[in-house]
Image (cartoon, grey):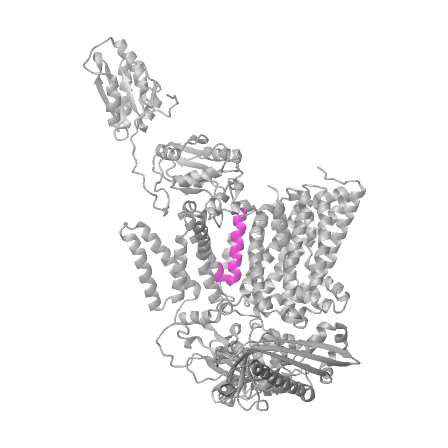
Amino acid sequence: MQAAVLAAWMLLPSGCWSNKEIETQSLQIAVALDLPHPTKVERGLDAVNPDRHARDYITNTFQLIIPGQVGKIGGSTSEELSTRPYRNISQTGESVFGNVRELAKRISTPPLGHHLKVIIISDALAKRYDIASFLDFYFRDNDIRLSPLILISRGEAGKTLESDSQTDIPGFQIPETVRNRFRSNKILPPVQSYELLSMLRSKKSFLLQTVVKSDSELEYRGAAIVKGESGKIAGYLSDQELEAASWIRGGNRRGGVLKLGRNLSNVPIDMEIGSIQSSIAAKESNGRFHFLVDVEGDGEIMEDWRQTAVGKYSDAYYRGMERKLEEEVKQNIESLLDQLQSRYHADPLEFHETVRRRMPRTWKKVQEHWDEHFSAADVEVRVRIHLAGHGASELS
Amino acid sequence: MSRESGGSAPAGVESSWSGSYVRNMALIRKSMETNADIKLRAFTISHGREACLAYVDGLADLKAIDMLLLSKLGDPTSDEGSIENVELAVRRTLPSIIGAAWSDDYALILNRIRSGSTALLMDGLSQALLLETVKDQTRSLEEPISEAVLRGPRIGFCESLQLNTALLRSAGEAPNMAMEKMTVGREIRKEIMIVYMTDIVRAGLVEEVKKRIAAIDIDHLPESGYVEQLVEDNFLSPFQQIQNTERPDRVIAGILEGRVGILLDGTPFALLAPATFSMLIQSPEDYYDRWLPGSLIRLLRFASVVICLLTPALYIAFTSFHPGLIPTKLALSIIGARQGVPFPSLIETLIMEVSIEILREAGLRLPKPIGPAMGIVGGLIIGDAAVQAGIVSPILVIVVAITAISSFVIPQYSAGITLRILRFAAMICAATFGLYGVVLFILLLLAHLARLESFGVPYLSPLVPYRPRDWKDLLLRLPLPLLRKRPSFLSPQNEFREDNG
Amino acid sequence: MKLTTPQTAVLIINYMLATAILVLPRTAVQEAGTPDIWICVLLSGLLSLVFGLILSRLSGLFPGETVYQYAGKLIGRWPACFFGTVMVVYFMVISALEARSLQEITSKFLLEGTPGWAIVMPFLWVGAYLVLGGIQPISRAFDVIFPITGLIFLAVMMLSVHVVDLHRLLPVMGQGPLPVLKGMRATAFAFSGPEIMLILVAFMQKPKSAGKAFAVAVGVVTLFYLIDCVMTVGTFSIDGVTARTWPTIDLMRSFELPGLLFERYESLILAIWIMKFFSTYALSYYASSLGLSQLFRIPYRTAVFVQLPFLFLINVLPAAIEDVFKIWDLLSMAGTGFILVIAVILLGIAALKGIKHAQS
């Protein structure tokens, strides 16, 4: 009896509280963070009704999928969408959370954070502020998951979310490119929100993939070095340096391409990488660290412009090729390490992990200023490459 | 030959049978004033003796009377032998007719006539001879409509208790199959037969069943459904606690597990007690096919039960409360589909579900040729039109269709009804609290099922408590050689189906 | 009908697995400071096993009687009454806190706009409905909840394998054994639950197997906690894990498997965990109802209903989730500790009195 009364009483205001129909919200699938630069729209709004606030810290550009414009995405239809299925809205303000809430005043369908796929940060913003500071909202909010991909854009982040295509949605396209990792070792393993969180809190340096936009094309190109102590960008790695970094990281990196540089060969010769095993051994003496990087890779020759001249592939040719490739890799790695140690004073390649795992007591002593210890360390590089074959070509 | 005490006789009439033929006939004639369907046929047998037959035309099998009885009574024209010899002969030969009984209890005689027996009165005999001449009133044995199987006997019970028990006996020689008769009903008395295997069933179960049936106090039991409702443990529960079936093979299987079968005269629906939730999923043909299809189809049924119960609720929960918990592409599809729909998802779903239920009920009442077509046509057209008109979203139509179809998979029609009801409850819970509401609903349901018992057997058996032996026959149907033991939750006396020695 | 041994094991498992598993990685790492918390888990499991066996043995001496009933025989009526009341209050607080934790999680992740009381009240009512049925229906319901929640939990954990980097768990014992001991302060509370043996053994078919049931239960619980800790720390590393209030849930939210049916699995985990909270709450509620009924000689049904308003009150008392955690901490230290100590004392007294075998 009591149950019936209670049930009736509870069901009367049924659905009044958290009930929000799905079509009353827009899906926020990507967001770009920039240094503050109010858009024309915003300046227009301010002109009519100026807002009194201290100062702007950040501009958020939201890529939203507005319900009204969804039409039949994913379904099969011959309808042409007259407008793009998404909309980019920029909002400048004091804080990220403030910007998000401002949207409630600008569009009728407030954003839903659950489906956020990628966060793009402009390098200028990351140079000025600690990344952990402006990303705090994205870690705290209980709707936004810890899965979005984090990228740094060279140049204005908001522009990366624009696209000429009528059907492609950048918010979906950009993270999906990461899946091409097996074709290129110049793409870093994706850093998702949860991982970034751990890295920021551990105060160790790390790398973040950068994207570059030219005209209307976006490319994954190079990486940014974020210094652990400050959480800000200290410098960049070029594509080639990134490749060298991937050799150090190792870990079964299939599919990358290794080219012989100009100094080792005057025509293009490419090897497709099958896998890379890498190990880092560490020793410490008198406060100075000594690292041994041992890299072993195997692969196949995929393109050799000297093919006809060579004639038959002999064992000697292979061995010679291997030596040249090894030298190439070694040079690249050494030049990368040089940059990291002398110029940037940072260890984003996780040499510290070796120390932490193998020599925990030593680690406790040095972990505070690890970047300096690393910069002073000796690093020896050893490279071995095995060529398995030469594709589908064979010459007699 | 049996003697029973009869029921009540019409008041105000001299109710004692006498030795006088004439007086007895008068008694019968008097009763015909209020029982106009009784007919009296007087005739003469040898030696000019008078005799008469009293019967109910339509109920008594006249052919049988003619053939058996009168041939034994001898040639009316012959006057051979003495009348005493004739009497002796009559006394000796007539009882050999099956179902014959002597009686001088007027009330009993009247009752028996009204039940279809024929009474033979003969001048010179103080007692009347009652003959079982009930005509078989039933239709031919057909496959039950509501429990059709693809493979298996196409026989169903009919309305005659005699024939039904005969069907059970005809399964084979069964020295341990016991049948006990009980009578229920005050104004109109009916016979109930309780069937069980003496060497298998738990003793207390039979006692409990008989106790509950004996406690029924009602004027008439038109259908076994009444028995079910008057005897079950918890009448407030949406779940059936007694199984009903039209199939003899189901009853046989049931009693071999240790259940008790209850047959009521006048209905082809037999009852099996106790029942557990596993009857939602099991069907006799699971056993007639091989174990692999049997197991897979059972799993499919189980999945259908879950789908049927929860799909609309989950749709409401995710659409209205947690769009963030579904895959992004799906969310986009739903958003696209819901463009222009004026109702919140609960109302939308209710509209469609109620419409489907209306269609379903309507389809049952329509004449056979139109019924199924109506269901399909109605569903298609209405669903499509609703989508075109923008009242519901196409995704919802899919959801509702899948739900409806899954509910047909359940072998027991009455169990299907339970799920249909619960589905609405789930939808309301989802509309109030989203996914949390659905989980609460599941918990409430679980709590209810955990508390429910049927004749002392927990309703959630054989799933819980953990008895791995019983699981071999629950979700999967393991090969027959592995199903050697009977389910233990019925506490059978004899565990093994085969000879263990 | 009495409880079979597997039934008892399932009851214990469902009772012990509750809030703790969602926060354990964080609390343990906060105390220990190293990734060795999995060792803490193992050790705490052993510790819990020891206590459970002691309590089973104690209850086994008085078959058919719960501690409310037999304590009086050992330490006299009034002390036993006091101890019983402490236990009743303890169980009530556990019930209320479980409900509160549920409210927090549901509110945060599922139903943001809904007021707390609306979330909690139906929960309390459904629990009361189940508890009214007694130990048998509770056990049956648990028997259904356990496989569902257990399997889904394991399955989703397995799915998260691709975001886990086991290297984050190294080094093992890098800072020596001290962090492990510190970490056990947090993991010990996760294993609080042996006290339920003081009640359950009375209903068992074979009280002698109580110890076995408990051992199996602790084994399963340890396994779950182990997987939880390894996966969470493996994904977030010790730095990240301390930053999240509910690390296990965040683990679920850190990956998407596009195309694989659900894509995002936190909905499953949340649904499972609601059921788990419910089971701990129900059993604890039962324990306190039983206590009230047996100690103060009131009918069982009344005992159940009378607690509802109190449960609700306790439920709304803590102002924020941090307070809830503080109370948990206090409860596990003081409450469980107290009960365990008393129980050991009781066992000692029983030995002194020469009660070595079951009293019929």
From the viewer's perspective, tell me whether residue C359 is left or right of residue B94: right
* Residue segment shown in magenta: B429-452
Provide residue B330's location: percent of width, then percent of height.
45, 69
Q: Is residue C183 in view?
A: yes
Q: Residue furthest left?
A: B77
Provide residue B25's location: percent of width, then percent of height.
27, 19
Image quarter of residue C104: bottom right
The answer to if B185 sits in the magenta stretch is no
Q: Nearer the viewer, residue A254 or C101?
A: A254
Image quarter of residue B86: top left
Magenta segment, principal secondary structure?
Answer: helix
Image quarter of residue A382: bottom right
Q: Residue at x 74, y 40 (%)?
A: C357
Q: Residue at x 45, y 72 (%)?
A: B332
Q: Residue furthest right?
A: C352
Q: Nearer the viewer, residue B110 or A382?
A: A382
Marker count (numbered): 0
Q: Nearer the viewer, residue C179 or B418?
A: C179
Q: Residue furthest top?
A: B82
From the viewer's perspective, tell me whether residue A216 is left or right of residue A251: left
**Does C245 sit above or below residue B262?**
below
From the viewer's perspective, tell me whether residue B95 is left or right of residue C216: left
The answer to if B441 sits in the magenta stretch is yes
Provide residue B483's location: percent of width, then percent of height.
50, 43
Q: Is residue B461 in view?
A: no
